[in-house]
C-alpha cells in the first residue's frame, strides 16, 4: 500500500480517537480486535494504536511523538513492540509460540509490551489455539492488537476475548472525495462527466489499494477486463484480454465478472422499475444469474490455493454458462 499516514485517512480518525480515549481513561482491554481491512489502513491504525500504548507521555489525542518510546517506534526498533505477519498464506504456530514467550519477558523500556498480529484471520488452527492462553492470561502490561481483514474467519474463542474497535466503513462518495483530494481521479470526458472509479472497490479491496491501482496499470487492466467480459458475454466468444489472462490475473478477471453479473441483475431491475413493460428478467432467471455469480466467487476463493489453472478454458466456461441462461 502507498505510504499514507493515518492523518491522511479520514475514516480512521474516529476509531483512532476512540482507542486513545479508552486507553487514556484506563478503560482499555488487554486485547483488541481491529476488524479493518489493510486496504482501509487497518495495519496502519494498529501500529498507531501500539504507539499510543507505548508512549511515555500520552496525550488525550494520541502519542506525544517526542518521548524516547515514540522516537524508538519512529526509528522502527522499539524493543517492546512485536509484530507478527503471515508466513506465506498462514500465521504458523511457531510464530505465535515465539511471540508468547517474548511477551513473558520484562519490558526493556519499563512500560508495556505490545504485540500486533497483522491479518489475524490467517492464524492456522494450531496457532490460534496457542494464542488463546495469552489472550486469557496476558500478564501485566501486555497488550495485544489483532488486525483482520475478515473477522468471520477467526475462531469465536479468539474474538470473544478481544475488545472490538467500532469502525464504520467510508461510503463510496467519501472515498471518491478522498481520491479527488489526492488528485488521483482521471480527467472528465468530453461531456464533462467524471468516470466513477469506485466500481472496483470490492475487487481491489479498499481505497488504499484503489489509489495504488490508479497510479499503475492495474486499474486500466480492470477496466479492460470489464469491457471484454461485456463483449464476450454478448458474442459467446472470448475477447481480447480474456484470451491471454495469466495465472496472476485470473482472480482479478473473475472478480470483475462477478461484479458485472451482479450489476446485470441490478441494472435490469432498475430498468424494470422505470418501465412497466420491461419483462427481461423474471425472478427465476435473476436467481440463476446470481447463482452463476456465486459460482464465480467460489472459484475465486479456490484459486487462492490452486497452483495453476487453464485460464482461457475457465473464462470460456463462464461465458457459455451465461449464454445458456440468456439466449
Image (spheres, rainbow, N blue to C red):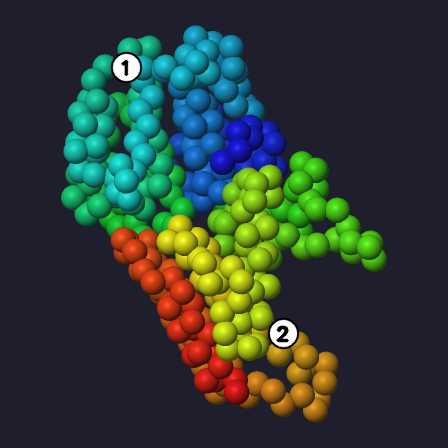
Whole-percent x and y of residue 113? 31, 21
Q: Is residue 88 left or right of residue 190?
A: left
Q: Earlier in the sequence, mark 1 or mark 2?
A: 1
Whether residue 188 is situated above or below residue 264 in the rendered picture: above
Q: Residue at x 57, y 70 (%)?
A: 230
Seen from the viewer's position, the closer of residues 96 and 190 is 190
Identified at 67% across, 36% down, the residue is 182
In this picture, residue 147 sits left or right of residue 220: left
Q: Nearer the viewer, residue 139 or 48?
A: 48
Query: Could one spot residue 208 in this view of the protein?
Result: yes
Dot 1 surroundings within 10 Å: few (below 14), some, or many (20 or more)?
some
Q: Which residue, given by chain and number where applicable, does mark 2 sit on?
A: 267
In the image, 258: left or right of 54? right
Residue 168 in view, yes or no? no
Badge 2 crowding class, 10 Å Cα cut-off, few under 14, some 14 to 19, many 20 or more, is: few
Is the Cβ of the residue at disc 1 closer than 8 Å to that at disc 2?
no
Instruction: Read off the residue under disc 1.
Output: 107
Amino acid at each position: 500500500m502507498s505510504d499514507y499516514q493515518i492523518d491522511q485517512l479520514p475514516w480512521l480518525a474516529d476509531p483512532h480517537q476512540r482507542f486513545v480515549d479508552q486507553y487514556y481513561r484506563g478503560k482499555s482491554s488487554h486485547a483488541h480486535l481491529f476488524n479493518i481491512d489493510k486496504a482501509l489502513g487497518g495495519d496502519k491504525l494498529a501500529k498507531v494504536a501500539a504507539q499510543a500504548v507505548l508512549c511515555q507521555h500520552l496525550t488525550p489525542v494520541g502519542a506525544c511523538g517526542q518521548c524516547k518510546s515514540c522516537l524508538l517506534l519512529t526509528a522502527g526498533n522499539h524493543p517492546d513492540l512485536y509484530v507478527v505477519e503471515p508466513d506465506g498464506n498462514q500465521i504458523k504456530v511457531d510464530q505465535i509460540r515465539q511471540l508468547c514467550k517474548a511477551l513473558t519477558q520484562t519490558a526493556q523500556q519499563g512500560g508495556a509490551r505490545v504485540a500486533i498480529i497483522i491479518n489475524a484471520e490467517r492464524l492456522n488452527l494450531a496457532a490460534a489455539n496457542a494464542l488463546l492462553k495469552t489472550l486469557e492470561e496476558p500478564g501485566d502490561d501486555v497488550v495485544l492488537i489483532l488486525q483482520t481483514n475478515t473477522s468471520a474467519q477467526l475462531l469465536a474463542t479468539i474474538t470473544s476475548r478481544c475488545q472490538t474497535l467500532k469502525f464504520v466503513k467510508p461510503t463510496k462518495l467519501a472515498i471518491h472525495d478522498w481520491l479527488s483530494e489526492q488528485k488521483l481521479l482521471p480527467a472528465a470526458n468530453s461531456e464533462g462527466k467524471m468516470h466513477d472509479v469506485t466500481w472496483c472497490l470490492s475487487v481491489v479491496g479498499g481505497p488504499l489499494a484503489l489509489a495504488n491501482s490508479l497510479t499503475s496499470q492495474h486499474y486500466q487492466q480492470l477496466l479492460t477486463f470489464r469491457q471484454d467480459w461485456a463483449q464476450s458475454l454478448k458474442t459467446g466468444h472470448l475477447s481480447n484480454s480474456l484470451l491471454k489472462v495469466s495465472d496472476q490475473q485470473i482472480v482479478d478477471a473473475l472478480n470483475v465478472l462477478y461484479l458485472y453479473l451482479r450489476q446485470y441483475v441490478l441494472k435490469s431491475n432498475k430498468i424494470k422499475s422505470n418501465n412497466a413493460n420491461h419483462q427481461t428478467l423474471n425472478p427465476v432467471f435473476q436467481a440463476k444469474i446470481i447463482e452463476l455469480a456465486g459460482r464465480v466467487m467460489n472459484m475465486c476463493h479456490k484459486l487462492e490455493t490452486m497452483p495453476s489453472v487453464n485460464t482461457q478454458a475457465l473464462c470460456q466456461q463462464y461465458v457459455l454458462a451465461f449464454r445458456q441462461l440468456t439466449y
